[in-house]
Amino acid sequence: MIPTESLEIVRAVAHFRNFTAAAKHLHKVPSAISYTVRKLEERLDVQLFLRDSKRVELTPAGEHFIQRTGKLLTELEELEKTTRQMASGWEHEIKIALDNVVNQGMVYDLIRDLQAVRPETSLVINTEVHNGSWDALFHNRCQLVIGAPKTIPDNIATHDRFEWKSMGSLAWDLVMSPEHPLANISGPISQDMLKAYSSICIQDTSRVFRQGYNLLLEDQQILLVPSFRMAIECLLKGLGITIMPSHFVQPYIEQELLVRKDVLDIPMNDSCYLAWNQEAMGNGIRWVLDWLGEENWLNKVWLQYDTMKPMGYHVP
């Protein structure tokens, strides 16, 4: 059987296309890397790399080897995790995705309480945007997502390994700087009026599923940013308009830093879900689901503005 270390060494050489760089990455001497690759090629009786004085390139056999070993190493890692889970009942690692519409500050209480209960379990927190939340759940980048949008992709809805429950309603506001031309318009804003100005959108993090944006009309100029926090800064500087969860912008509106306007006929994600992968679910995910609670509580702490919290508590 080929040692796992040999597989990792060959993959490092393939990635860096250089023995010295691979050795530095793996904290080994270049001669040890070269020796391992040579011995593996002798064992397989194939040449994995074409070598010259500066770079190495994969042969067709090498390309095949790299493709198959990537999947193999992933499966071995998963086997290690599930074996530990079978022994203890707890996941070795819990991966949670926060959709960017939820209050970010609440997650620190979750981290603290989980660490107190199960310090041996690693916790990975990531932020996803719009369909990126469903994409992350379906493609195993997370085991649980908080705040996934209301439209459930068919891949999720028709697959029995996923479950979800409502987090209640989600309110949005059309906002802009007080100096923006639309700020002085009386009455609701129409789509035709919006089209004349740059829309600040958050980049959807979906890698496979269809992407969507918080405010994007046909033929409208777009300013694409990575987070609502940056979107707010752009709004304050008068760089565009956008719709944003009300619990993010309420304090800015109250302090007259931003202006809220009524808007006509703009589709919005007006509700969202707590969703999880129930396949091989252990005590960790069960504990997190119990800690998160039911719809009314989920809505209150994740989707509502809390006047007792500092302004930065809410915005991702």
Image: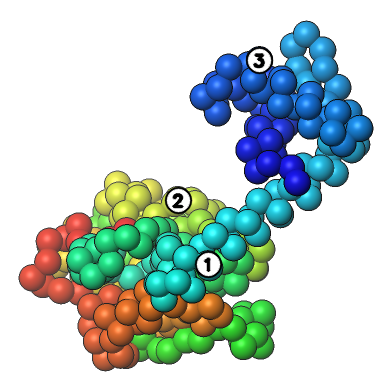
The local secondary structure at tag 2 comes to: strand
Q: Residue at x 37, y 58 (%)?
A: 122
Q: Residue at x 54, y 60 (%)?
A: 80
Side of 114 relative to 7 (left or right): left
Look at the picture and state if 115 lies above or below 232.
Answer: below
Instruction: Tell me the residue that label 2 is attached to.
Output: 225
- Furthest residue in direction top, as rendered: 53
The picture quadrant where one finds residue 178 is: bottom left
The local secondary structure at tag 3 comes to: helix
Q: Earlier in the sequence, mark 2 or mark 3?
A: 3
The CA span between labels 2 and 3 is 46 Å
Q: Nearer the viewer, mark 2 or mark 1?
A: 1
Q: Residue at x 64, y 68 (%)?
A: 209
- Residue 224, percent across and down? 49, 51
The CA span between labels 2 and 1 is 41 Å
Instruction: Tell me the residue that label 1 is attached to.
Output: 83
- Residue 129, percent across and down? 47, 63
Q: Earlier in the sequence, mark 2 or mark 1?
A: 1
Disc 3 residue type (three-letter): Ser
* Classed neighbour count for the residue bearing mark 1: other residues with Cα under 10 Å, few (<14), some (14–19), many (≥20): some
Question: Is residue 168 in view?
Answer: yes
- Are the residues at dot 2 and dot 3 in contact (C-beta closer than 8 Å)? no
* Classed neighbour count for the residue bearing mark 3: other residues with Cα under 10 Å, few (<14), some (14–19), many (≥20): few
The picture quadrant where one finds residue 291 is: bottom left
Instruction: Tell me the residue that label 3 is attached to.
Output: 31
Side of 298 relative to 205 (left or right): left
Disc 1 residue type (three-letter): Thr
Q: Nearer the viewer, mark 2 or mark 3?
A: 3
